């Protein structure tokens, strides 16, 4: 049995949505977002190569410094302190200092960490992090 023509649209005829939650979707289908107080970080979902990084930079209409840098790593989205489960008024907790209730906080493995540092940890997923203001 075959499907009726037009029942399932061909992929090239389906419009790519422009957003998915906090993520923006590039014309080529890459999910990305700008984060940081001055939008100095570009997160691209997945571990991408240089061509994809450049394509997303162009899609985001960014004008990065000539020596911008990027790294493949693992990220997670936090909405509460991972140590206290809520925001606590403690002066020495780096999470509580940075997280504001209702605003997500993005955390990712440091570039000096092994690429697999958070590979199997709950909540982490692969990203490419671009510092557009080196």
Image: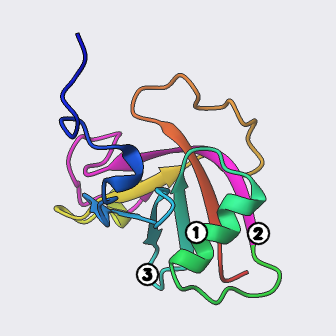
For residue 1, above or below residue 36: above
Where on the picture, by quarter, is residue 57? bottom right
Q: Tell me the mark number nearer the camera, choosing from 1 and 3.
A: 1
For residue 22, which numbered disc appears in the image? none
Q: Is residue 77 magenta?
A: yes
Q: Horizontal placement of 77 versus 39: left or right? A: left
For residue 69, which numbered disc appears in the image? 2
Upstream in the sequence, badge 1 or badge 2?
1
The residue tagged 1 is 56
Q: Residue at x 56, y 44 (%)?
A: 46
Q: Is residue 65 magenta?
A: no
| Element at label 3 | loop
Q: Which residues are magenta?
A: 69-94
Q: Residue at x 65, y 78 (%)?
A: 132
The residue tagged 3 is 37
| Element at label 1 | helix
Question: Which quadrant is the C terminus positioned in?
Answer: bottom right
| Viewer-side residue, 121 vs 43 | 43
For residue 48, above or below residue 57: above
Where on the picture, by quarter, is residue 2? top left
Instruction: Determine the CA span between mark 1 and mark 2.
Output: 14 Å
Q: Horizontal placement of 80 versus 53: left or right? A: left
Circle 3 residues within 10 Å: few <14, some 14–19, many ≥20: few
């Amino acid at each position: 049995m075959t499907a009726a023509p037009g029942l399932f649209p061909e992929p090239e005829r389906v419009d790519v949505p422009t957003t998915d939650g906090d993520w923006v979707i590039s014309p080529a289908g890459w999910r990305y977002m700008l984060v940081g107080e001055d939008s100095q970080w570009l997160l691209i979902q997945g571990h991408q190569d240089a061509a994809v990084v450049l394509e997303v930079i162009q899609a985001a209409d960014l004008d990065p410094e000539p020596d911008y840098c990027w790294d493949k790593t693992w990220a997670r989205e936090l909405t509460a302190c991972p140590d206290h489960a809520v925001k606590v008024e403690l002066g020495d907790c780096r999470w509580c200092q940075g997280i504001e209730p209702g605003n997500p906080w993005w955390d990712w493995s440091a570039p000096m960490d092994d690429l697999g540092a958070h590979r199997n940890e709950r909540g982490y997923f692969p990203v490419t992090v671009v510092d557009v203001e080196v």
